[in-house]
Image (tube, rainbow, N blue to C red):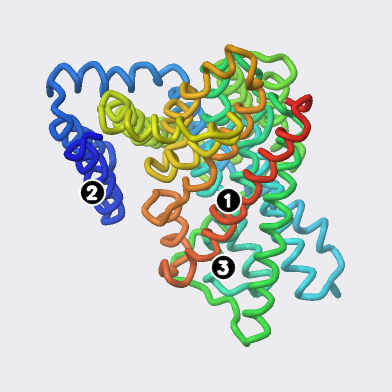
Amino acid sequence: MNILGLFGIIAAMVLLIILVYKGMSNIYIAPLCALLVIITNGLPILSTFKEAYLGGIAEWMPVGFAYAVLGALFGKIYEKTGAAQTVGRFLLNKLAANKDVSQSRLVLLGLIVMNAVSVLLTWTGVSGIVVMMATIPIAFSIARTANIPREFIPGILMNGGTIAAQAAPGAPSIGNLTASSILGTSSTAALIPGLINMAIVIILGIFYMHKVIMKSIRAGKTFEEIEKSKSSQAQEQKYPNFFLALIPLAVIFLLFVIFSLDILVCLTAGILISILLLTRYLPEKGSKSVFTMLNDGISNGCVVFFQLASLMGFASVLQYSEAFQDIMNAVASMNGNPLVVGTLAVVVFVLLTTSPPATVQLGLPMVLPSVESGVLAAGAIHRTAVIATTTFECMPYTGAAIISMASAGVTFKEGYKHIAVQNIVIALFSTAITTLILILFPGLA
């Protein structure tokens, strides 16, 4: 075991966590941490940085561009035109049409709506963090209507529906796409176990949030506005019709899942249709507002892309190091079912990197020999690996967690525990259950 190299890896990861938590961008922190790994592992600095760090980014670029840049652009159109708010408000109004509905039922309906909207957006190509940002007005609307204390808004924003849909069969998520590219599997691999996992995460998440919210309400806590909350903006905006807002989502879903077209084609089609159908609902009229929206979407997408790319480069450098190979060998040498070993490896790597695409690229090559020999079904490890990537991707230092707290105006002490229960505890439980199902019923892969 290379002790100095292992220390370098641990130190690099701790630095990455601390510095990103303090507000520094991983776009420049990740390469610095990668240099620490390179130096402590005795690797040639310049050649390793070019081949491993930049090479890792270049290898991931075809998948990452579609997911990050086009996904963010589509999400920005959906957010600015009010289409996301339309979907949420329509469902909530329909479910809570009865004015005499109890507060407990109203809270439950609000949680169901939030999960439904998140699943709808995520399952049709919008990245998790973009979904969260686009649904901030919906979360505030639910909290205001049901008198839910603000400390629960981060948990509502980061509800189980988002992580469930990211790992769902057919979802154009980065985990699904990366696993398909490595294993040669379909995005709908292990369809039934994947849908069971989705149901477990959503149902348990709603049950938990409803229980803690009602306990807080009974204790006398209520919703309180925060100054300049995003939910109060654009009150005079005209929103698109509910069914009109669904068309771009349906197009992406049908092209990707039914016709199996490339995700670049699917998202591009969704963007073009959104521009044609929805831009007339922008608060400010004229081509300038359209161009501003598109510019903002592309800019946001590029930032997201390079944030993810920097972590992919860091993960690639880890793979080059002797110490990390020792860690991987220790995990791979564990005795047991190859599906369990492969899934556990992904859980360990996502805990270390909090990057689903990087984790999939690190974990799946370990089980490729078992897949190629026929001992392990490619569809089974595809689904459990993608599900396993959702277990630790919402650590407190990640961008999504930080943004959700800031948007709700609450502290980590107030709000993070509800994210942790949904996005870590429940996700770990559902990962274990899905793995067990595929072990007992391998034909479902």
- Measured Cα–Cα span from mark 1 to mark 2: 32 Å
Residue 80 lies left or right of residue 426; in this view the side is left
Q: CA distance from mark 3 to mark 2?
A: 30 Å
Q: Nearer the viewer, mark 3 or mark 1?
A: 3
| Front label number (3 vs 2) | 2
Q: Earlier in the sequence, mark 3 or mark 2?
A: 2
Q: How many other residues sit within 10 Å of disc 2, few (<14), some (14-19) or many (≥20)?
A: some
With 420 as the anchor, is 319 left or right in this view?
left
Query: Eyeballing the image, is 157 above or below 59?
Result: below
Helix, strand or loop under label 1: loop
* Amino acid, disc 3: Phe
Q: Amino acid at mark 1?
A: Thr
Taking the view exactly as shown, the residue that stands out farthest to the bottom is 220
Looking at the image, is 63 positioned above or below residue 394?
above
Q: Is residue 203 positioned above or below 340 on the image?
A: below
In the displayed structure, would residue 389 be above or below residue 233?
Answer: above
Residue matched to label 3: 152
C-beta proximity under 8 Å, tags 1 and 2: no
Residue closest to the eye, 74 or 59: 59
Label 1: how many Cα within 10 Å (few below 14, some 14–19, many 20+): many
Q: Residue at image x 64%, y 14%?
A: 374
Tell me the amino acid under the disc marked 2. Leu
Task: Answer yes or no: is residue 265 visible.
Answer: yes
Disc assigned to residue 135: 1
Q: Give 333 or 158, whichever is nearer the viewer.
A: 333
Kind of element beneath mark 2: helix
Residue located at (52% from left, 61% from top): 154
> How far apart are the two marked residues, 3 and 1, measured between alpha carbons?
14 Å
The residue lying at 70 percent from left, 51 percent from top is: 202
Question: Mark 3–mark 1 contact, CB under 8 Å?
Answer: no
Q: Nearer the viewer, residue 252 or 9?
A: 9
